[in-house]
Amino acid sequence: MMRADPVPVILVHGWNSHPGAWKQLISRLDAVKIPYARFDHSGMGNKHLEEIARALSRYIAAWRDETGYSGPIDIVCHSIGTCITRYLLEVIDGESKQERVRQLIGLGPPNTGSALAELFVHPVHGPAILNRLTGIFVPTGYDPAADAMVQDVRPKSEFMEKLRAAGIRHDITYRIIVTANPEGVPEFFPWFEGKTWEMSDMKEFRQTLEGDGIVAHAESLLPGISMDIIPLSPQGEGDLPPASQYCHISMTKNPRVNDRIMVYLTDCKSSKKPDGTERCRLPG
C-alpha cells in the first residue's frame, strides 16, 4: 500500500500532446520520491472534453484501487488538461466532492476559453492562422470544425459555460502558472512574432505580450486565484532556458516552470478546515 506522505501527483497533458511532455518534471519527482501517474488522453482527440473528464475520473479510481491509496492527491495539468480536470472536479464532482484533491496546478490554462480556438474557425483569419501553425501546433490538413476538443474550448461553448457556472471548489488550492514575453522577443514564439492572440471585451481579436504564444493571461485567470507569471529573462544572462521553452508548447520543459511546480508540491503543508477538507498552505 502506498504511503500517505508525500502526496502523490496525477499528471494531465494538454491538447495534441502526450504523457511524454512530463519527462523533465518526472525526473524531479523521482529525485524526491514523489509518486506520480500520467493520464493519457492522446488517443481521444475526437472526443468531447466532458467524455475525457469522465475518463480521467475512471483513471484516478483505477489508480487508487491499484495502489490502495485513498488520501488526497495533487493534480498538475498543462493547457486544456486543466479544463478537463476542472470539469471533473467542479462540474461532475462539484456537489458530492468525492475526489480528494489537495492542489490543482495548471500551466498555461485556457480557463475562460481560447481566442485561438475561435480564430481557427474564423472565416477570414482562420486559414492564415492555421497555415502558420501547421506542423508547429496543428497537424497537416487539420480541420478545427471536426475537432471536438477545440470546439469545447471556444469561449462561448456549452462546456465553458458549464465551467463558469460551476465555479471553483473551495476545498481545493488552485495554482496558475503562466509565462510571458515582456520585452517582445520574437524567438519566444516566432510564428506570432513573440505575441499571443486574445479577444477584447468588445469581441475583437488583438495581440498581446501577456501570454505564452497560444494562451493569453486573461484566458488563464480565475476569480480570486493568484497567478504566477514567469517572464522570459534577457538571454545571455546566466544559465537560463532558451526563449523557445517559455512558449506554451514547450513550457513543461522549462526548468523555471518546473522549479515553481516543485515548490508547490514539496513545500505545501496540508491543513484541515472545520468541515474536514484539506487545504494547502506554503510556509511563511
Image: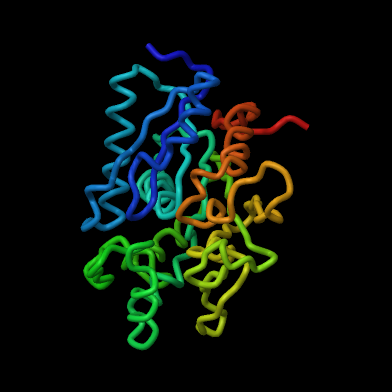
In the image as oriented, which residue stretches furthest toward the top? 1
In the image as oriented, which residue stretches furthest toward the right? 284
Q: Image check: 53 left or right of 231?
A: left
In the rendered view, would you say 237 is above or below 223?
A: above
What residue is at 58 percent from the left and 44 percent from the top?
257
What residue is at 29 percent from the left and 35 percent from the top?
59
* Residue 17: x %, y % from top left: 34, 50
* Residue 81: x %, y % from top left: 40, 49
Q: Nearer the viewer, residue 168 or 211?
A: 211
Q: How many marks?
A: 0
Q: Nearer the viewer, residue 143 or 164?
A: 143
Q: Nearer the viewer, residue 16 or 279?
A: 16
* Residue 283: x %, y % from top left: 73, 30
In the image as oriented, which residue stretches furthest toward the bottom? 124
Q: Image check: 53 left or right of 46?
A: right
What residue is at 63 percent from the left and 33 percent from the top?
263
* Residue 225: x %, y % from top left: 62, 52
Q: Image check: 225 left or right of 237?
A: left
Location of the C terminus by quadrant is top right
In the rendered view, would you say 22 is above or below 247?
A: above
Location of the N terminus by quadrant is top left
Q: Nearer the viewer, residue 191 or 118?
A: 191
In the image as oriented, which residue stretches furthest toward the front? 236
Q: What colour scheme has been applied to the protein in the rendered image?
A: rainbow
In the rendered view, would you say 57 is above or below 46?
A: above
Residue 150: quadrant of the picture: bottom left
